[in-house]
Amino acid sequence: MNTATLDRSAVERIVRQVVLSKLAPNGQPKSAGKSTGAVESQLVVSVSARHVHLTDEHVEVLFGPGANLTPMKPLYQDGFFAAEETVMVVGPRKRMLPSVRILGPTRPASQVELAFTDGISLGIELPVRPSGKIDGTPGCVLVGPKGVVELKQGVIRAERHVHMNQQHAAFYGVKNGDRMSLRIESSCSLVLEDLLVRADETSKLEVHLDTDEGNAADLDHATRVELLRQSKR
Amino acid sequence: MNTATLDRSAVERIVRQVVLSKLAPNGQPKSAGKSTGAVESQLVVSVSARHVHLTDEHVEVLFGPGANLTPMKPLYQDGFFAAEETVMVVGPRKRMLPSVRILGPTRPASQVELAFTDGISLGIELPVRPSGKIDGTPGCVLVGPKGVVELKQGVIRAERHVHMNQQHAAFYGVKNGDRMSLRIESSCSLVLEDLLVRADETSKLEVHLDTDEGNAADLDHATRVELLRQSKR
């Protein structure tokens, strides 16, 4: 009963977003430059609740021949969506999460992204991986209304990362594959290190955290978020 | 079923501890001084799962006239213990946590300490408070085998803090009530700011975090923890 409640509230908050950037990077006072201010004000910090990505083939196994994902809610990045479909994720020793949201569109490999709190409840020790790098990660069983898929691998905690376009990257002085830090100011202020920079031509400026990170920082009540270049250690 | 599983694993890990301090404060290379090394090597970082503190009166209401808490496991700080007794914590809209551990000894006021993840599952918006400062905080209902207590207030997220004695305080150059930062190095490195310094004559050097903070940092697999003086902002 309590699990169902938890899951429902997680689904309602598939993506919580905070847009609070008020300072320039590196804690410098805001420049008067108009273009500078424009980049800062675009910073969005999103919390992704646990979710699943599926291949076309696995969508058909789980939801029936010819099935497609049904977009329910667009995500902040253009072209991505939360689907109406959910699956049960079953871990070892018959522990399970009854209803985990699927995000679209489909992908070349199926993948389950969980917070550590979810991993503890499932009994899976989660490796921290960038999305798509799932070699050697744990597997699980996905149960849908029309079928079952056994994933040999693909259960991860997604590595925290920041999406941006090349203009943002130039503004922050970073490039694809670099690392940055995110400072969140709240009643539980913290600095998250080692955010992977994922820079391309078209992405919006958006940090992706998981629910453990969002809850640790009380992101919902944050008063400021700052993206910082990481000093070398 | 899943809730019970979660709770059992939380109970098994009432206090997870990591002792990994390898560096001097402020990231300076380790001093050759023997006493300096002695202080650093004492740093313990503990994660407290959700728990309840009770008054003597409430112990008797919940567990019967004349009842006392039964020590099950000593905590790291001398004189404190996890009790064998647990209570059900009931929030608004009949959501509940079925079995929350009681920590002893008893106190002048009853108090429930939860992580934000627990607050979401209970439907309670948790204020972040130092232990004992519960004026104006939300209440809940506690259900024991022999009776029920309605708490008018006392449900909080405990503010992260560090216990130490005056010798530790002198070593770090801080005093009771100051703030420090804790850096945790892992696959999910982060810096937790604003740890409240609770310095007295007798405490062991120990940071107290909650499960959200421990999970965000993957404390179980941390390779280094450092207690840092906080720069003024």
Image: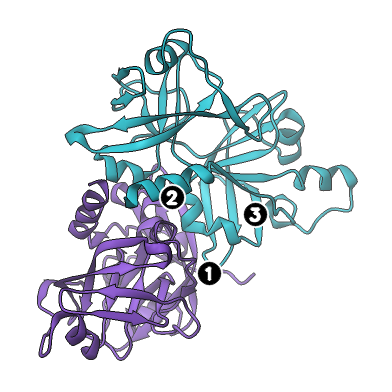
Chain colours: A cyan, B purple
At 77% from the left edge and 32% from the top edge, which residue is drawn? A167
Task: Choose mark 1 or mark 3, whichever is in front.
Answer: 3
A138 or B152: which is nearer to us? B152
Badge 1 marks a residue whose secondary structure is: loop
Percent position of residue A108, x then y: 47, 13
Q: Quadrant of the C terminus of chain B?
A: bottom right
Does residue A230 appear in this view?
no
Q: Amino acid at mark 3?
A: Val
Between marks 3 and 2, how big is the CA–CA gap?
A: 17 Å
| Callout 2: chain | A
B198 or A105: which is nearer to us? A105
Between marks 2 and 1, how big is the CA–CA gap?
A: 24 Å
Q: Is residue A138 above or below residue A123?
A: above
Between marks 1 and 3, how big is the CA–CA gap?
A: 19 Å
Q: Which residue is mark 2?
A: A212
Q: Amino acid at mark 1?
A: Gln
Does residue B201 appear in this view?
yes
| Callout 1: chain | B
Q: How many marks?
A: 3
Residue B230's mark?
1
Percent position of residue A217, x then y: 51, 58
Q: Which residue is mark 3?
A: A225
